[in-house]
Image (spheres, rainbow, N blue to C red):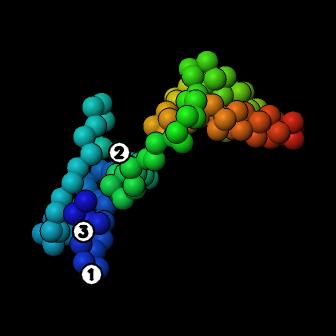
């Protein structure tokens, strides 16, 4: 939020995984942030950049709009069907790790749960997945 409210030029500066930022860079910083990690001493640089990018996106986005009046929200059965079809397609396409497909898939599908999609929206996504599946070799 401070970053979004800043006027003029500003930067996010990341240190390396082993040593972090050098002291000279730390002294120039107006604010410091860390990402707590339970089992590791640090994240790799790409992970850290992704976490901060995600947090900036969350701070910047507008609250989700409620579904249209009278629209039926997708139920758990329909969301489960979408998950199953997405998993099958993404495994077939080589996107998901076959040993741990749930890890990435669950994270990706959280966006749908936050959005509270309608039945029609999920049915459209199912149709799109089916069409793509027919064309993936």
**Closer to viewer: mark 2 or mark 3:** 3
Give 1 or 49, whichever is nearer the viewer. 1
Q: Tell me which residue sits at (40%, 56%) in the image.
A: 61
Task: Find residue 129 and report its horizontal and vertical position in percent.
Answer: 75, 37
Task: Find residue 72 and report its horizontal and vertical position in percent.
Answer: 58, 30
In this orientation, does residue 129 appear?
A: no
The relative height of residue 95 versus residue 15 in the rendered view (above or below) is above
In this orientation, does residue 125 appear?
A: yes
Is 66 placed left or right of 95 in the picture? left
Quarter of the figure that contains the N terminus: bottom left
The relative height of residue 124 versus residue 28 in the rendered view (above or below) is above
Quickly name the residue at label 3: 5
- Counting residues from the N terminus, which is met first, the one under dot 1 or under dot 2? 1
Q: Tell me which residue sits at (39%, 49%) in the image.
A: 63
Quickly name the residue at label 2: 43
Quarter of the figure that contains the C terminus: top right
Give 112 or 21, whichever is nearer the viewer. 112
The quarter of the picture where residue 5 lies is bottom left
């Amino acid at each position: 939020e401070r970053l979004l409210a800043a006027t003029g030029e500003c930067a996010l500066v990341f240190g390396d995984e082993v040593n972090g930022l050098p002291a000279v860079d730390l002294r120039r910083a107006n604010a410091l942030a860390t990402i707590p990690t339970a089992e590791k001493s640090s994240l790799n640089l790409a992970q850290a950049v992704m976490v901060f990018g995600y947090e900036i996106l969350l701070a910047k986005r507008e609250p989700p709009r409620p579904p249209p009046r009278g629209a039926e929200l997708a139920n758990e059965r329909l969301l489960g069907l979408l998950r199953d079809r997405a998993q099958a397609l993404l495994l077939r396409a080589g996107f998901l790790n076959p040993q741990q497909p749930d890890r990435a898939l669950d994270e990706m599908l959280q966006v749908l749960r936050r959005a509270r999609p309608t039945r029609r929206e999920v049915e459209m996504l199912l149709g799109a997945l089916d069409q793509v599946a027919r064309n993936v070799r």
